Image: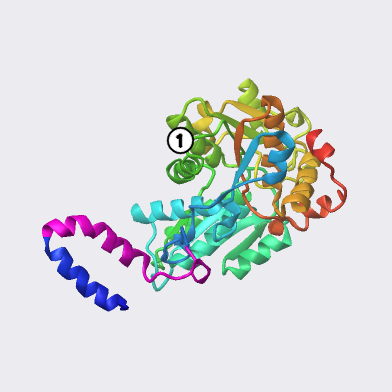
């Protein structure tokens, strides 16, 4: 005699009507309905985790995966992990910052979405933040106006324009110049807001000084890292541009486990290394008579700075150490990761991985190191990857001698 699923359901209802028998048989009935019809394992696929449906592109930001970098872990005898921030919808960790800034402005009444005459988000940036703002402006009902140096790479300008941003190019200048691209963005935001002929308002995102930046990493990136590693980690290392990531993540990790060591990875020409190591925001290239827009001919973009920001200052006391990374080391690392792990990364991500290798060698086998892959190499083709292509034969010895 064969009992189909509907017959079984009726029998189950009768059985469960009896309290005594129900208490005994309920687990078995529940197991049957949970598992469904019994079929061969070859005919089913069990999905242990499927991400939930999100609302809009902004709903995709965060909860990025973490991977173990196989080649680097094998070479060092350590466990080297990377949080894949390059998998955010806008392609970088800056999506988190842009979203936090927009949401804060909305909460404070400075932005209203989907107005007939759209409010405008202004930012001065030659990096990934502009792309994140441009993407989210379109997704959330705003316009984006990005001011940048006129020598910004063509691929970044093209991406911004493709995302519908107004791109205003200005000549490279010092931060003290009122027409420097960051100052220009601030001016344009104020001018629009004060214009009584329109209902549009403008905000200056101000990623360097806006503390929504580090708070986003304290509230989200840090907790995600701690949860993904189950708190079982020894070192966190990343570079600093605005200082938001290292400040926010370091503060969260230290709040959970003060023994986690946090390290700043710094490219040539940046003053962060000396600030952490010696308490002075200075680099040797800044000595009298040498100051220029690009302090050295570094090819690293997105990290490194020669001034203190609010975001860096908020977490400075939680940063334990700093490591200097040279351009050639980053280029070799980028080539190595493509050839051995299939990871096509940008320049700041390469800096982070070089620092992770150095820390692994300093601290010996068995430790667990977490870093961040900020963005992919797609935004770095004309500069960083053009140079990286010259390193055809990067060996394991080259990487271990970094």
Which residue in the protein does label 1 denote?
A: 252
Would residue 243 be found to the left or right of residue 303 on screen?
left
**Mark 1, secondary structure of its residue:** helix
Query: Where does residue 349 sit, x and y in percent of width and height?
Result: 67, 46
Q: Residue furthest top?
A: 278
Query: Where does residue 181 sit, x and y in percent of width and height?
Result: 62, 52
Visible in this render: residue 24? yes
Would residue 282 be found to the left or right of residue 385 on screen?
left
**Disc count in the image?**
1
Image quadrant containing the C terminus: top right
Tell me if mark 1 has few (under 14), some (14-19) or many (20+) residues whose alpha carbon lies within 10 angstroms of its own. many
338 magenta-colored: no
- The residue closer to the viewer here, 401 or 98, is 401
Would residue 395 be found to the left or right of residue 238 on screen?
right
Name above or below for residue 345 compared with residue 368: below
Would residue 123 be found to the left or right of residue 360 on screen?
left
Choose top left, top right, bottom left or bottom right for residue 304. Answer: top right
Visible in this render: residue 184? no
Tell me the magenta residue range.
19-46
Q: Residue at x 41, y 66 (%)?
A: 55
Q: Residue at x 45, y 40 (%)?
A: 218
Query: Where does residue 23 sit, x and y in percent of width and height?
Result: 18, 55
What is the magenta segment's predominant secondary structure?
Answer: helix
Choose top left, top right, bottom left or bottom right for residue 386. Answer: bottom right
Name above or below for residue 53 compared with residue 109: below
Query: Where does residue 47 sit, x and y in percent of width and height?
Result: 47, 62
28 magenta-colored: yes
């Amino acid at each position: 005699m064969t009992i189909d699923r509907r017959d079984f359901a009726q029998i189950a209802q009768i059985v469960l009507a009896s309290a005594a028998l129900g208490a005994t048989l309920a687990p078995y009935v529940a197991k049957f309905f949970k598992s469904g019809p019994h079929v061969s394992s070859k005919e089913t696929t069990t999905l242990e985790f499927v991400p939930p449906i999100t609302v809009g592109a902004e709903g995709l930001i965060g909860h990025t995966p973490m991977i173990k970098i196989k080649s680097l872990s094998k070479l060092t005898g350590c466990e080297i992990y990377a949080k894949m921030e390059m998998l955010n919808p806008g392609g970088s960790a800056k999506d988190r910052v842009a979203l936090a800034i927009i949401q804060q402005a909305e909460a404070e009444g400075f932005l209203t979405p989907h107005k007939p005459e759209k409010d405008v988000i202004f930012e001065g940036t030659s990096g990934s933040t502009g792309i994140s703002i441009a993407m989210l402006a379109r997704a959330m009902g705003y316009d984006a106006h990005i001011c940048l140096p006129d020598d910004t790479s063509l691929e970044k300008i093209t991406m911004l324009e493709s995302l519908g941003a107004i791109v205003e190019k200005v000549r490279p200048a010092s931060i003290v110049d009122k027409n420097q691209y960051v100052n220009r963005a601030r001016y344009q935001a104020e001018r629009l807001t004060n214009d009584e002929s329109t209902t549009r308002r403008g905000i200056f995102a101000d990623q360097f000084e806006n503390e929504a930046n580090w708070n986003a990493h304290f509230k989200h990136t840090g907790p995600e890292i701690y949860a993904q590693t189950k708190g079982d980690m020894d070192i966190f290392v990343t570079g600093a541009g605005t200082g938001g990531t290292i400040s926010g993540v370091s503060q969260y990790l230290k709040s959970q486990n003060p023994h986690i060591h946090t390290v700043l990875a710094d490219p040539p020409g940046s003053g962060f290394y000396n600030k952490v190591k010696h308490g002075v925001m200075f680099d040797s290239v800044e000595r009298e008579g040498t100051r220029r827009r690009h302090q050295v001919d570094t090819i690293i973009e997105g990290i490194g700075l020669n001034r203190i920001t609010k975001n860096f200052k908020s977490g400075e006391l939680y940063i334990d150490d700093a490591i200097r990374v040279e351009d050639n080391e980053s280029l070799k690392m980028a080539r190595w990761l493509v050839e051995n792990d299939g990871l096509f990364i940008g320049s700041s991500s390469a800096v982070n991985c070089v620092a992770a290798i150095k820390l692994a060698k300093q601290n010996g086998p068995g430790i667990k190191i977490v870093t961040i892959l900020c963005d992919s190499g797609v935004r770095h083709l004309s500069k960083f990857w053009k140079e990286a292509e010259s390193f055809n034969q990067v060996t394991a010895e080259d990487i271990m001698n970094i």
